[in-house]
Amino acid sequence: RCCDPENTKKKFKEIIRTAPRNSDWTAFTDLFQYEGFWHSPRFLEGTLLAQELFQARPCDIILCSAPKTGTTWLKALTFAIMNRALCLDDSKNPLLLATPHECVPYLEVDIFQNKPNRYPDSPLLATHLSFDSLPNSVVDSDCKLVYICRDPKDVFVSLWHFIGNVRAKEEGYLFPLEKAFELFCQGASLNGPYWDHVLGYWKASLEFPKKILFLKYEDLKRETEFYLERLAEFVGHPFSASERREGAVEKIMQLCSFQNLSKLEVNKTGEYAIFSSVVVENSKYFRKGEVGDWKNCLTGEMKDRIDGITEEKLRGSGLTF
Ligand code: A3P
């Protein structure tokens, strides 16, 4: 890794010039392979800056995920847990007025790309980086990581809709399903290969269970209360008996539910600029929020192919979907 901040730009240019490049996501972005994972150029530049400059503090909580695995939900839940007094007061609750992405900035996007940060001192950050690409200080310090993953079939379907919708000139345009599927299976998707991303954090969570909380979207859906309590404890803000009696756990669950967040005005009509040139409607982060929607999109053959890759990649790891 580059040791001098002055070299970061040079290194970025060099990677863009020489790294394996995939231009097949034509309607979306070219992807560049760096440290085994595929990145859009802007994310890649932010990654290099983060690797170079980010100094994690022991109090930091970093929410880690591959895209489309439930990042928005995890951001909302963790933000609400850590800013409980604010979020349980309807007159002040930031989650009623801003998308969770504005409340919890991305390490490789927001922090080093001169964007105003709503909460400059907040210990809460998010990243799509793979475990091995995290800045050294994240691994070396006592900060904590929460990782969320999801059934690869639902991740793919969610990604396919998202990519189509974000870049669509006409509402409803979708990138060809078969082509997107092939790219996803080959690992050439945003922050892919998806399976390697999951495995990196899974193995690290087994090695450092006090540092990394590993969550699955499906578990969070099925037993939201249980995992919300676990998350609160892990980030050092457990619910007290009196908070429980007063319904704080249920209120946060309800506040961050798909049904509630997706119908808020800010999430129906607002926009969030990932970069100045990439503005995404907040509604694109709230599609269906269900487990198993892949059944409406994938053929039996596609299901078998993804399940086969999952089985092969995760074999022996102790992780299943
Ligand atoms: P679907 O496209 O399957 O509906 P990410 O936040 O990582 O981009 O993931 C987006 C996925 O999470 C989308 O899945 C979206 O609908 C779902 N999602 C967003 N908010 C959610 C919430 N509060 N509860 C459950 N799922 C949510």
Image (cartoon, rainbow, N blue to C red):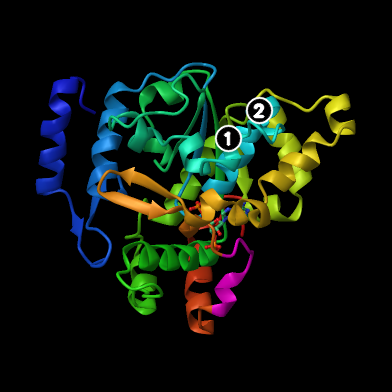
Q: Secondary structure at mark 1?
A: helix
Q: Position of residue 238 (x, y in %)?
A: 75, 26
Q: Is residue 206 visible?
A: no
Q: Residue at x 79, y 34 (%)?
A: 248
Pointer 1: what residue?
Answer: 94
Q: What residue sits 72% from the left and 33% below the top?
A: 88
Q: Which residue is mark 2?
A: 86
Please give the range of residues in magenta.
288-296
Please give the name of the residue rendered at 61% of the width and 60% of the height, measured from the top-left corner. 321
Q: Is residue 120 left or right of residue 31?
A: right
Q: Gap in Å between the C-alphas at discs 2 and 1?
A: 8 Å
Ligand 1 rendered quadrant:
bottom right
> The N terminus lies in which quarter of the figure?
top left
Element marked by disc 2? helix
Which numbered disc, 2 or 1, marks the residue that appears first in the sequence? 2
Q: Quadrant of residue 49?
A: top left
Please tell me whether residue 316 is drawn above or below residue 129 in the rendered image. below
| Nearer to me, 6 or 105 | 105
Q: Amino acid at mark 2?
A: Leu
How packed mark 2 is, by other alpha carbons closer than 10 Å (few <14, some 14-19, many 20 or more), is some
Marks 2 and 1: CB-CB under 8 Å? Answer: yes
Q: Position of residue 97 (x, y in %)?
A: 55, 41
Identified by mark 1, the residue type is Pro
Residue 218 shown left or right of residue 182 in the figure: right
